[in-house]
Amino acid sequence: MSYNRKIIQTSSYIEIYEYEKVIFTQDENIKNTEPKKERKKKRNFDELSTEEQNERLERISKTRKNSRWEVMRLVDTNFDKKTSFLTLTTKENIQDRNQFNLLFDKFIKRLNYKIFNSKKRLLKYLAVLEKQERGAWHVHIMLFDFPFVPQHDLVKVWGLGGVWINKIDVDSKENRGRYVSKYFEKGIGQELLESYGKKAFYSSRNLKKPEILKFVTFEETENIIKHNEVLYETEYSGKIFKNGELLENRIKYKKIKID
DNA sequence: CGCTGGTCTAGACATAAACA
DNA sequence: TGTTTATGTCTAGACCAGCG
């Protein structure tokens, strides 16, 4: 499958990438007969040369940035009138990420049972862990299609500390993903090394996913966007692999409001 | 309220079902 | 409601095709 256009659609906007050169992906029919090269074991940060350390840091921050866009799209796709935003903190100073995550997972399970009275996980959520100054983890959670629950009930379900219900005031529909990803940003971007190999965000598996289309075309996109508002537009330089080397590939990006 | 993105994929990680 | 296990999802290193 090859393509020179990629379109991602969420509920309030579509994003269009136009690549100057067609991007090719490995053909199904051409089986790779070359023996697979052994994958290098992941090494500790200390074992890397300074250059490799920098490369790794760069890669991690790139991945984290991508996660931020991913979160933004997921939020936009799933946001509804019954969306709640919670922050959970613990009385105890829990500094172990895994330990905290386990507690968080149990909370989700209990909350799910309380609301749906079912063991089937029906709760729709998206969450990001964040470290506080004192070194303790806490979590920001977005709950979609979530009924009203009194704050003290939530405190009871959590049982380990504070529960904050944040109101999300968003001026316009297409800003909600942006607004929320800003809220999540700190958690996604911080502690790169400490959270190396860990997920940048957590989400239930029942969320709606943005739609992604990839195809080859030489049509202009102008007529598609004629009647819609362009929210953002840019042009930048990407890379394409050709003849054993990386060549420049100009990319036009447009973000367009839909309704 | 100003603004980002080569892709693929093994293997690590985390979620949810099954079970207790 | 807690714990174990199966399976979906994400990260980070590896790698890149030949046509509308």
Image (cartoon, coloured by chain):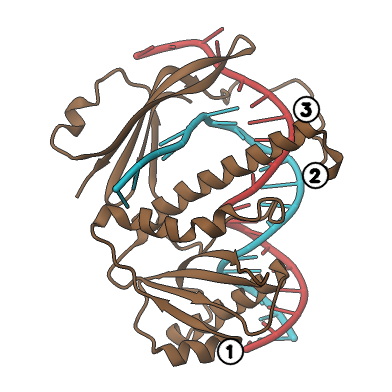
Chain colours: A brown, B cyan, C red
Percent coordinates x, y for residue A251 in the rendering: 40, 24
Q: Chain of mark 2?
A: A
Please name the residue that numbered disc 2 is placed on: A45
Closer to viewer: mark 2 or mark 3? 2
| Above or below, comparing residue A138 to residue B7 in the picture | below
Using the image, tell me which numbered label, if any, was put on residue A36.
Answer: 3
Furthest toward the left, the residue is A227
Percent coordinates x, y for residue A253 in the rendering: 35, 31
* Image point (46%, 91%), residue name: A153
Please name the residue that numbered disc 1 is placed on: A159
Corner quadrant of residue A47: top right
Q: Amino acid at mark 2?
A: Phe
Q: Chain of mark 1?
A: A
Q: Secondary structure at mark 3?
A: loop
Percent coordinates x, y for residue B10 in the rendering: 73, 40
* Image point (24%, 26%), residue name: A221
Q: Secondary structure at mark 2?
A: helix
Q: Amino acid at mark 3?
A: Lys
Marks 2 & 1 on one chain: yes
Discs 2, 3 touching: Cβ within 8 Å: no
Closer to viewer: mark 2 or mark 1? 2
- With A254 as the anchor, is A186 left or right in this view? right
Bin the neighbour count of mark 1 within 10 Å (Cα to Cα): few under 14, some 14-19, many 20 and up: few
* Image point (40%, 51%), residue name: A73
Of marks 2 and 1, which one's residue comes earlier in the chain? 2
Corner quadrant of residue A176: bottom left
